């Protein structure tokens, strides 16, 4: 099947600017516009996930044509009388179907491409491009390299050119080696017996003394909302919001003091809030990559 995700770009800012009711009306109108395209391309809506629609199609051609019309309609119709944009990722391949839902690496790759795509972009894969008709191959172009889930080899990511007028299109430098970060898995955070998974479906957690935090610590040197860990595209970052800072121990043995700034979390390590592990070895938060896809649907 061709698996396609259409995601509303920066919907969080809509809620912040317009309020919950108005923003939700715009999101629903946009999802309705996306859904209206499916019948013309033998597509099926599998489900909506927040501000994102997951759809399937019987062929690569139909998925690409549907994605292009979705972009065109959203751009021209202003769903909910408000300018919104979407970004789309799609991949054609083998899937598992169970009770109408769809699973497998094809789904994970399509979700990953959606996360990588920017506003008004449609991204697809090299193997999908090879399944397209000659006419549609003429409207895709290679732009990146990536190692996709389910493969150990680097492949090419293609952009679908859906506009009739591409005068403002950025030229692609084919001489440079542009490999984008792959889907290296979600991030697991462990405090005593508690475990939290940060991924596409839970893209941020807060750690601190407040009982409203996702992981609650007791150390009085910790702030009420001490730090947050967020998924930004395909990387995980620690953002310190505290008075005393966060102490991150790396695999190399180095301890980094993070105070009112951010730090990339990679591999495995430990986090102490408010004071270093040497000062208080008891309350330690471990972080490690779960190598399964962060885009599991």
Image (cartoon, grey):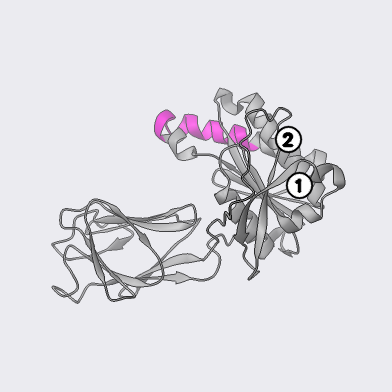
Q: Nearer the viewer, residue 70 or 235?
A: 235
**Residue drawn at (76%, 52%) of the image:** 129
Q: Secondary structure at mark 2?
A: helix
Per the image, is 179 magenta?
no
**Residue drawn at (75%, 58%) of the image:** 127
**Residue drawn at (65%, 55%) of the image:** 110
Q: Which residue is mark 2?
A: 69
- Label the magenta part by its dominant secondary structure: helix
Is 172 above or below relative to 261?
above
Q: Position of residue 241 (x, y in %)?
A: 24, 51
Instruction: Indicate which disc residue 63 carries.
Output: 1
Residue 48 relative to residue 133: left or right? left
> Is the C terminus in the top left, top right, bottom left or bottom right quadrant?
bottom right
* Quarter occupied by residue 139: top right
Per the image, is 26 magenta?
yes
Q: Position of residue 274 (x, y in %)?
A: 17, 62
Residue 25 relative to residue 283: left or right? right
Q: Residues within 10 Å of mark 1 (few under 14, many from 20)?
A: many
**Residue drawn at (57%, 57%) of the image:** 179
Q: Secondary structure at mark 1?
A: helix
- Residue lying furthest right in this view? 134
Is 215 above or below relative to 291?
above
Q: Nearer the viewer, residue 89 or 178?
A: 178
Q: Magenta residues? A: 16-31
Residue 103 in sight: no
Q: Position of residue 63 (x, y in %)?
A: 76, 47
- Pick whichever of labels 1 and 2 is earlier in the sequence: 1
């Amino acid at each position: 099947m061709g698996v396609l995700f259409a995601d509303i770009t920066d919907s969080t800012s809509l809620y912040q600017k317009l309020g919950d009711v108005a923003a939700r009306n715009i999101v629903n109108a946009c999802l309705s516009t996306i859904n209206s395209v499916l019948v013309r391309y033998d597509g099926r809506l599998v489900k909506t996930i927040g501000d994102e629609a997951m759809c399937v199609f019987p062929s690569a051609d139909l998925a690409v044509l549907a994605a292009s019309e979705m972009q065109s309609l959203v751009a021209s119709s202003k769903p909910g009388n408000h300018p919104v944009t979407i970004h789309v990722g799609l991949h054609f391949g083998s899937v598992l179907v169970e009770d109408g839902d769809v699973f497998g690496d094809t789904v994970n790759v399509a979700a990953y491409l959606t996360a990588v795509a920017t506003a008004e972009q449609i991204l697809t894969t090299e193997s999908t491009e090879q399944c397209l008709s000659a006419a549609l191959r003429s409207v895709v172009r290679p732009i990146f390299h990536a190692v996709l889930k389910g493969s150990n080899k680097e492949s090419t990511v293609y952009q679908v050119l859906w506009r009739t007028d591409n005068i403002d299109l950025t030229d692609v430098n084919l001489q440079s080696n542009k490999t984008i970060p792959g889907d290296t898995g979600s991030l697991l955070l462990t405090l005593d017996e508690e475990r939290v998974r940060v991924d596409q479906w839970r893209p941020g957690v807060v750690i601190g003394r407040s009982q409203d935090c996702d992981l609650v610590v007791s150390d009085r040197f910790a702030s009420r909302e001490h730090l947050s860990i967020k998924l930004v595209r395909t990387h995980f970052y620690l953002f310190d919001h505290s008075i005393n800072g966060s102490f991150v121990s790396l695999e190399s043995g180095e301890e980094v003091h993070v105070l009112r700034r951010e730090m990339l979390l990679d591999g495995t390590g430990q986090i102490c809030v408010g004071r270093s592990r040497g000062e208080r070895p008891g309350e330690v938060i471990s972080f490690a990559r779960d190598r399964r896809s962060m885009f599991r649907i």
